[in-house]
Structures are given as structure tokens and as C-alpha cells.
Image (tube, rainbow, N blue to C red):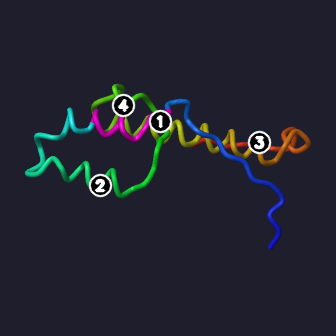
Amino acid sequence: MHIASAAAALSPYKFSQDVLHSALIKRWGSKFDDPRFLERLHDRVRVETRSLSLPFTGLAIWGEANHHWIEVAQTLGEEALRAALGPAFRSELVLLRC
């Protein structure tokens, strides 16, 4: 197998794990029998930052947030694909969106 090209595309909404952890504790901490569960979970994932499809203060309704995530995933996928293929292939590329 030969990989000819690769590219990445990330959402502009990048947050530190600490900021997200604080927001989750504020919003969901009282729902857990032991709020330290989230702290242990976040300590063990070993990431410093996360890219989200929207600000964590954005949509609160699960269905709306999920729909938005799908839209962002399609847009970022197209962006990465175009970047990987390069300018020589862009005129030949037709992307269909569902």
C-alpha cells in the first residue's frame, strides 16, 4: 500500500481539557453519586486540548447538537479531502453532500 497524501482539518473551537472539565462539573457534577468520577476520567484520558464542533455553551438540546456535529463533520471532511488531494485534483473533484 502507498499513501499518496494525507491532511487534517479541525474545528476552530479548541479548548483545554481543564476548561472542559470545569464546565462539565458545573453542568453535570450534581448528577453523579461521586463527582470525582469525572475528575478521574479526565485525568486518565491524557489529552491537553479538544476540538469541539461548537462552543460548549452552544446548543443544549441533544438532537440539535448532534445534527450540528454531522454538518461540521461533513464540512471538515471535505476540507481535509481537498487539502490532501491538492490543487491539481480540485477541478476534477465533485463532492456530494447528503
Looking at the picture, how far across and down is residue 79, in whole percent? 69, 39
Looking at the picture, how far across and down is residue 11, in whole percent? 55, 35
Q: Nearer the viewer, mark 2 or mark 1?
A: 2
Disc on the earlier residue, 4 or 3: 4
Indicate whether 33 appears above or below 78: below
According to the picture, the residue beneath numbered tag 1 turns out to be 53
**Classed neighbour count for the residue bearing mark 4: other residues with Cα under 10 Å, few (<14), some (14–19), many (≥20):** some
| 42 inside magenta stretch | no
Indicate whether 87 appears above or below 6: above
Whole-angstrom CA distance, mark 1 to mark 4, is 9 Å
Disc on the earlier residue, 2 or 3: 2
Q: Please, what is the three-letter code of the amino acid marked with disc 4?
A: Phe
Q: Please, what is the three-letter code of the amino acid marked with disc 2?
A: Leu
Looking at the picture, how far across and down is residue 67, in whole percent? 42, 38
According to the picture, the residue beneath numbered tag 3 turns out to be 83
**Classed neighbour count for the residue bearing mark 3: other residues with Cα under 10 Å, few (<14), some (14–19), many (≥20):** some
Disc on the earlier residue, 2 or 1: 2
Q: Say which of 35 and 98 sits in front.
A: 35
Residue shown at 18% from the left, 50% from the top: 36
At mark 2, the secondary structure is helix
At mark 4, the secondary structure is loop
Which numbered disc covers residue 41? 2
- Quadrant in the picture for the N terminus: bottom right
- 71 left or right of 64 in image: right
- What is the total number of numbered labels drawn onto the structure image? 4
Which span is picked out in magenta?
A: 14-23
Residue shown at 12% from the left, 48% from the top: 32
Whole-angstrom CA distance, mark 2 to mark 3, is 35 Å
